[in-house]
Image (cartoon, grey):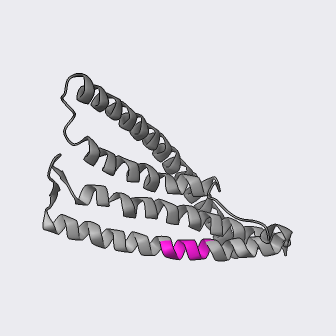
Amino acid sequence: MEKRNGIRVVKMIETLTKNVRLINGALKYLCMGLLFFMMALGTVDVFGRYLFNKPILGTLEVFEIILPAIVLLGLGYTQENRAHVKVEIVVSHLSLRTQTFLSIITNGLALFLSAMILWRGWVLVIGYWRMGRTIPTIGVPMFLPQLLVPVGALILCLVLIVQMVQCVTQLRGRK
């Protein structure tokens, strides 16, 4: 019976890992598309402003929405690929077991902070939704751009959970 439960847990972790990778892959392409759209909009706005004296209304507001979207939706992908900046001057001299243990601790702290950002971001989304405020120049409800914060934090939380489970599995395998 215990062996079956272990197999179920392993399959569940593998499914979670695969789904998180799929989500991050889709978000990567979404961020690339948003960046391309932002560059195209900026180019058209500059040409419109200087050639025809007709800038595109709301370009700045759209940029203010898209730029944080690119950053927030890319957090999980960056963490999944372990591409965040890290300083390993001391840690690189420790044993592999100690490095894995420290990785569990730091991922746990990052998970806690990400969960707090997720929670507070969701509270803000609900607040903006209840107020019914919009961005005046483009008419977008304020809660939609704010929704990027909890979505990005949720994806980051999922990646951190997967990485923590992988580290625990590594520690158990070395005993």
Q: Position of residue 155 (x, y in %)?
A: 48, 59
Vertical comparison of 80 with 167: above or below: above
Q: In the image shown, does 167 or 106 lie closer to the viewer?
A: 106
Residue 1 seen in the current view: no
20 to the left or right of 130: right
Residue 110 placement: quadrant: bottom right
Q: Residue furthest top?
A: 51
- Total labels: the figure holds 0
Residue 160 in view (yes/no): yes
Is residue 122 shown left or right of residue 170? left
Q: Residue at x 24, y 30 (%)?
A: 49
Quadrant position of the N terminus in the picture: bottom right
Give the dominant element type of the magenta stretch: helix, strand or loop.
helix
Left or right, residue 7 beside residue 117:
right
Q: Residue 20, percent across and down?
A: 53, 54
Q: Residue at the location (63% across, 54% down)? A: 83
Query: Residue visible at 55% across and 59% down?
Result: 16
Give x and y (percent) for residue 130. 16, 68
Is 110 part of what is drawn in magenta? yes
Q: Is residue 61 left or right of residue 148?
A: left
The image position of residue 70, as x and y in percent, is 43, 49
Residue at the spot x=63%, y=52% of the render?
81
Please state, as top left, top right, bottom left or bottom right, where the C terminus lies in the image.
Answer: bottom right
Q: Quadrant of residue 103?
A: bottom right
Q: In the depicted view, which residue is nearer to us: 76 or 172?
A: 76
Looking at the image, which is closer to me, 123 or 161? 123
Is residue 33 highlighted in magenta?
no
Q: Magenta span covers which residues?
A: 107-113
Snapshot quadrant of residue 120: bottom left
